[in-house]
Amino acid sequence: MSEEILRVQGISKSFAGVQALNHVDLTINRGEIACLVGENGSGKSTFIKIICGVYTPDEGEIFLNGRRYKQLRPIDSIHEGVQVIFQDFSLFPNLTVAENIALNQQVAQGRRFVNWREVNAIARQALERINVSIPLDVTVSELSVANKQLVAISRAMLQNARLIIMDEPTTALTHREVEALYKVVRGLQAQGISVLFVSHKLNEVQALAERVIIFRNGMKVIDTPAQEMTQEKIAYYMTGHDIAESRYEYQAKDAPIALEVSNLSRKGAFSDVSFRLRAGEIVGVTGLLGSGRTELALALFGAQPAESGTISLGGQTVSIRSIQDAVRHGIGYVPEDRLTEGLFLEQSIANNIVVRIMKSFAGRGGLIDSVRKAAEASNWVQHLSIKTRNPQLPVKSLSGGNQQRVVIAKWLASLPRVLILNGPTVGVDVGSKEEIHTIIKELAQQGLAILVISDDIPELFQICNRILLMQRGRLVNEFETQAIDEATLADHLLETVNQGQ
């Protein structure tokens, strides 16, 4: 019989009358890799915070290592070996790798003076335990997202972790980094450590999980061995309906050229990039980390201007030396990190939507016509199906998928000629992802030229009619999505790895 690490019975939690969790029963066994899956708002985060003692359940019981808790405090959870690695990793960016890993232990032991040789030794051993090597004297702020995550895992190991909960751990990782994380997780399992992998990426769930647990509307709807689940079944249980998304078929192949790039270069980022984007096209740009795909997007948007080459819009050569230039010429940009780059989180949904066109609502004396402004915001809320009780609520009150729609609405309100989407559904659940894909396709069918920057191969095949492959700052291949399959594109990406990227 398997040894239970965690068991919860009848856990319920509500906030201001909204039922976040409703009589959830769940068990995690020693050395098990389980995936907790659900859309945004399904109750995943509430469940995690109950297990780590941040929230107290309204009803139910928690058993950790056989001990019963009606009310679990954070210190109890830690002592029972529960470690949660949140998306922000809770690291100190101004401290070194060694300090982040080992100082907690030094403080817990009541040390009055720091033995730096011992700190480095502890940190080195913790990294070795998960079989990774990271310079100990590097400041954490200088690390990649993947390495920050490994530092957080190493620190958890020092706390005698028996259950590690990873909250959306692959949101900002490349494909290669995700594969490396899988290896680390399996290594934890080999040491008898249980891992609860919280995600909504269906391919990752299938690649890693032994068991799949799905929440919907605060309830556990299924708990089953992973081999019994397909991606279609997982999507169905997450959303409550079948998801059958069709590929984008580009018809107007003789449409006007909306954007033409010729020999565009920026030292250290990309060189001699040339391509055309027609009205109504959705063209994807992909490549591994360091391929130059995001730098190209930032150059087109004027955030990191190109140093040579030409950019033409509607047949006219334009100079884009700043973001203001790009906006003036009708280029919009939806960033990958919507929270820090795309939204004013404390401002209302309405203000975020109309921020780029606020001047158009100004009357005599510069006063804003609040009626016209509210009507414009409401129009986009309705058009993009932004789920909110009131557009005057702060945008931070929305789910990730709805926040992404607000960023898209902000740019659509300014009537762009070209829209650049960098990771359009990063951090978005499967239901919202399908809806955003539908919005993107409808915009293209209306004649908008769209450039999508992504390393999500299935996404590129769903929404793009062409895909451009970048390697080491150069465009090395171009594919019609109707002419190849996902495996072929993956093979071409693998070739860039083998060529030393």
Image: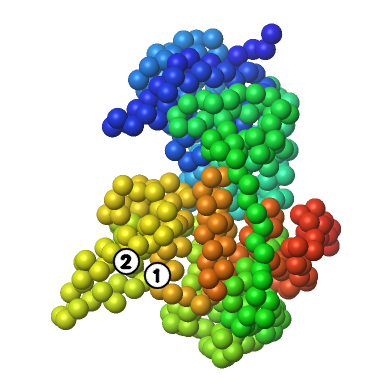
Q: Is residue 153 visible?
A: no
Q: Which residue is mark 2?
A: 376
Labels 1 and 2 touching (C-beta < 8 A)? yes
Comparing 119 with 367, the one in front is: 367
Local secondary structure at mark 2: helix
Q: Looking at this rendering, what residue extends furthest in the front direction? A: 251
Q: Quadrant of residue 35?
A: top right
Q: CA distance from mark 1 to mark 2?
A: 8 Å
Q: Amino acid at mark 2?
A: Glu
> Is 142 located above or below residue 68 in the figure?
below
Q: Looking at this rendering, what residue extends furthest in the bottom direction? A: 316
Comparing 169 with 372, the one in front is: 372
In screen coordinates, is 258 left or right of 472?
A: left
The picture places residue 175, in percent across and down from the top left corner, at 70, 51
The picture places residue 288, in percent across and down from the top left corner, at 71, 60
In screen coordinates, is 46 left or right of 238?
A: left
Q: Quadrant of residue 369?
A: bottom left
Q: Amino acid at mark 1?
A: Ala
Q: Looking at this rendering, what residue extends furthest in the left direction? A: 365
Q: Is residue 226 visible?
A: yes
Comparing 407 with 100, the one in front is: 407
Q: Few, some or many C-alpha atoms within 10 Å of disc 2 (few <14, some 14-19, many ≥20)?
A: some
In screen coordinates, is 151 left or right of 230?
A: left
Q: In the rendered structure, find residue 413 and report the number of the disc placed on it.
A: 1
The residue depicted at 45 percent of the width and 29 percent of the height is 218
The residue depicted at 73 percent of the width and 73 percent of the height is 474
